[in-house]
C-alpha cells in the first residue's frame, strides 16, 4: 500500500530554564493511504508533541532537532511539488500551504480552537476561502453567468453583474494582482466579495448538514459560545475537513466530551473517513477508543514508540512489557482487580538511560539500563523496541 506519511527518527526537545526536555527520542512510524493509525500512551509521553512536530508547529523553546517527516503528496495540485517531500526541509510559507490544504488537525479543546468573535459559518467559510479560493470563485462565475443568461436584467443590474464577473475572472487569473489590491481600498467596488461570502456560508451550512448537525442554516449564524461542546467539536471538524485534507490529525478529539457525545463524534470521524478516504493519525490515551477507530496502533512511552502493530494483534499478542502492563490496566468485564503500572512517568529532562522504561519494567536486565532498544520488525506487521520482548 502507498505510504502517506513516514516519520523517521524524529527528535524534538524543549529548552526550558529547568533543563532540556527530551520530549521525542527518535520516533518512527508510517501511515498508509486511507488508513488510521492510533497513537496511545500515558499523559506526557509525547503524543501532542508528535502531532505538532508533523504539522511543524513546535514553537520556541521547542525545537525539532533531527529526523525526517516524509509526506506523500498524493493529490497533485498546482501549488505543490512532486510526491514525497520532507516536511522538515520545507519553508514556512510552503508549510502554510500544506497545513489545511494537505494536513489538517482537530485539537483537544474545541472552544480554544474557535474564534469567539466570528460566527461558526464565517470560520468554516474562511477555511474554504483560504484553501479553496479558486473553487469558490469558479462557482461565483458560474452563478453570475447563469443570472446573466436567465433573468431579464436591465441596464444597471447587467452592468453590475458584468463588473462582478470581470472581478472574479481577475481573481482566478492572478489573486495577488496590484489592480485587485488597489480596488480593495474601496470595499463597495469589490462586489465579488459579497457573493463569495454568501457562497462560503452556503457551503458551510451544507458541510454541517452532511455531518448531521440539526438546522445547519441557523447554526452557521451562531457564535461558538452559543453551541454545546459536542456541537463546537463538530464545527472544528468541519473546519479541518473543509478542504478535504490527505491527512487528518485528531489529537484527543473527544477527551472533554461526555460519553454519548463522544460516541457520536467518533462515529462522525469514522463516517467521514469512509466517505473521503482521508488518512488519520488518531491520538488518544484510551485504548478502547483506539480499538474502535484504528486499524494500526503505535504505543508510546516517554517520547519513544515501543510497539507498533495492527490493533487486533496488539490486544491478542502484545509483546512489549509496557503494552502488556497497559492492557492489564484497562477495566474489563469479569476482572475485579486492575493492575496499575508501578513507578512514575519519567522526568524527560533526565530520562532513564538505555531503555526509558527500564525503571518500571519487570523484565529489565543489565543491557536495558545501557543500550536503547531500536524498534525492529519481529513478524509481519509487528514492530517492537525491546531487547527481550515477549518475556
Ligand atoms: N512548550 C513546552 N515546554 C516545555 N515542555 C513541553 C512543552 N510542550 C510539551 N512539553 C513536554 O513534552 C512532553 C510531552 O508532552 P505532550 O504534550 O506531547 O504529552 P501528551 O502525550 O500529549 O500528554 P496528554 O495525554 O496529557 O495530552 C511532556 O513532558 C511535556 O512536559
Ligand atoms: S528493553 Fe529491557 S527494560 Fe526495556 S522494555 Fe525491554 S525488557 Fe524492559
Ligand atoms: Mg496531548
Image (cartoon, grey):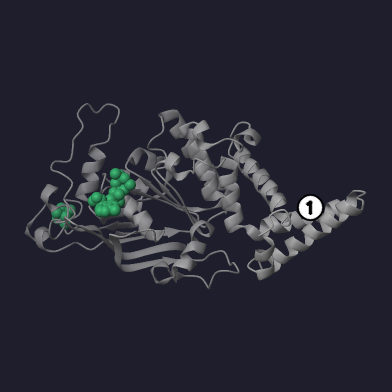
> Does mark 1 have its CB less than 8 Å from ligand 3?
no
Q: Residue at x 61, y 37 (%)?
A: 221
Asked if residue 12 lies left or right of residue 363, the reply is: right
- Up-down relation of residue 205 to residue 55 (above or below): above
Q: Quarter-wise, where is residue 25 in the image?
A: bottom left
- Up-down relation of residue 81 to residue 310 (above or below): below
* Residue under label 1: 143
Q: Residue at x 34, y 51 (%)?
A: 48
- Disc 1 crowd, CA 10 A, few/some/many (<14, 14-19, 20+): some
* 120 or 268, nearer to the observer: 120
Percent across and percent down for residue 239 are 54, 47
Say whether residue 331 is visible: yes
Q: Residue at x 51, y 56 (%)?
A: 100
Q: Residue at x 23, y 38 (%)?
A: 328
Which residue extends farthest front?
A: 186
- Up-down relation of residue 177 to residue 226 (above or below): below
Q: How many marks?
A: 1
Asked if residue 107 lies left or right of residue 325, the reply is: right
Q: Quarter-wise, where is residue 130 in the image?
A: bottom right
Percent across and percent down for residue 26 are 27, 63
* 84 or 182, nearer to the observer: 182
Which residue extends farthest left?
A: 366
Percent across and percent down for residue 101 are 54, 59
Percent across and percent down for residue 7 are 36, 63
Say whether residue 319 is visible: no
The kind of secondary structure element at disc 1 is helix
* 197 or 23, nearer to the observer: 197
Asked if residue 146 lies left or right of residue 305, the reply is: right
Amino acid at each position: 500500500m502507498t505510504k502517506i506519511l513516514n516519520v523517521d527518527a524524529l527528535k524534538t526537545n524543549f529548552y526550558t530554564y529547568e533543563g532540556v526536555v527530551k520530549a521525542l527520542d527518535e520516533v518512527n512510524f508510517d501511515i498508509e493511504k486511507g488508513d488510521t493509525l492510533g497513537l496511545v500512551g500515558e499523559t506526557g509521553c509525547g503524543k501532542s508533541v508528535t502531532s505538532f512536530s508533523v504539522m511543524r508547529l513546535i514553537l520556541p523553546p521547542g525545537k525539532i532537532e533531527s529526523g525526517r517527516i516524509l509526506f506523500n503528496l498524493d493529490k497533485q495540485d498546482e501549488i505543490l511539488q512532486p510526491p514525497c517531500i520532507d516536511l522538515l526541509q520545507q519553508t514556512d510559507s510552503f508549510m502554510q500551504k500544506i497545513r489545511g490544504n494537505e494536513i489538517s488537525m482537530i485539537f483537544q479543546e474545541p472552544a480554544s480552537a474557535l474564534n469567539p468573535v466570528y460566527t461558526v459559518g464565517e470560520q468554516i467559510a474562511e477555511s474554504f476561502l483560504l484553501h479553496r479560493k479558486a473553487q469558490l470563485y469558479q462557482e461565483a462565475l458560474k452563478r453570475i453567468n447563469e443570472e446573466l443568461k436567465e433573468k431579464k436584467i436591465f441596464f444597471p443590474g447587467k452592468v453590475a453583474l458584468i463588473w462582478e464577473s470581470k472581478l472574479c475572472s481577475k481573481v482566478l487569473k492572478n489573486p495577488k494582482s496590484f489592480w485587485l489590491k488597489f480596488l480593495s481600498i474601496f470595499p463597495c467596488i469589490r462586489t465579488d466579495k459579497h457573493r463569495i461570502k454568501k457562497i462560503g456560508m452556503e457551503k458551510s451550512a451544507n458541510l454541517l448538514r452532511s455531518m448531521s448537525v440539526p438546522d445547519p442554516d441557523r447554526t452557521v449564524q451562531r457564535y461558538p459560545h452559543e453551541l454545546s461542546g459536542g456541537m463546537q467539536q463538530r464545527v472544528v471538524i468541519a473546519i479541518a475537513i473543509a478542504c478535504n485534507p490527505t491527512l487528518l490529525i485528531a489529537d484527543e478529539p473527544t477527551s472533554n466530551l461526555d460519553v454519548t457525545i463522544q460516541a457520536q463524534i467518533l462515529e462522525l470521524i469514522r463516517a467521514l473517513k469512509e466517505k473521503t478516504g482521508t488518512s488519520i493519525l488518531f491520538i488518544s490515551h484510551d485504548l478502547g477508543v483506539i480499538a474502535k477507530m484504528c486499524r494500526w496502533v503505535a504505543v508510546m512511552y516517554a517520547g519513544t514508540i515501543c510497539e507498533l502493530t495492527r490493533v487486533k494483534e496488539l490486544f491478542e499478542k502484545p509483546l512489549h512489557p509496557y503494552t502488556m502492563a497497559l492492557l492489564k490496566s484497562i477495566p474489563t468485564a469479569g476482572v475485579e482487580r486492575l493492575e496499575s503500572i508501578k513507578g512514575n512517568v519519567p522526568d524527560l529532562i533526565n530520562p532513564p538511560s538505555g531503555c526509558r522504561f527500564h525503571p518500571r519494567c519487570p523484565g529489565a536486565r543489565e543491557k536495558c539500563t545501557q543500550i536503547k532498544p531500536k524498534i525492529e520488525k519481529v513478524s509481519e506487521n509487528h514492530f517492537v523496541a525491546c531487547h527481550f520482548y515477549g518475556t
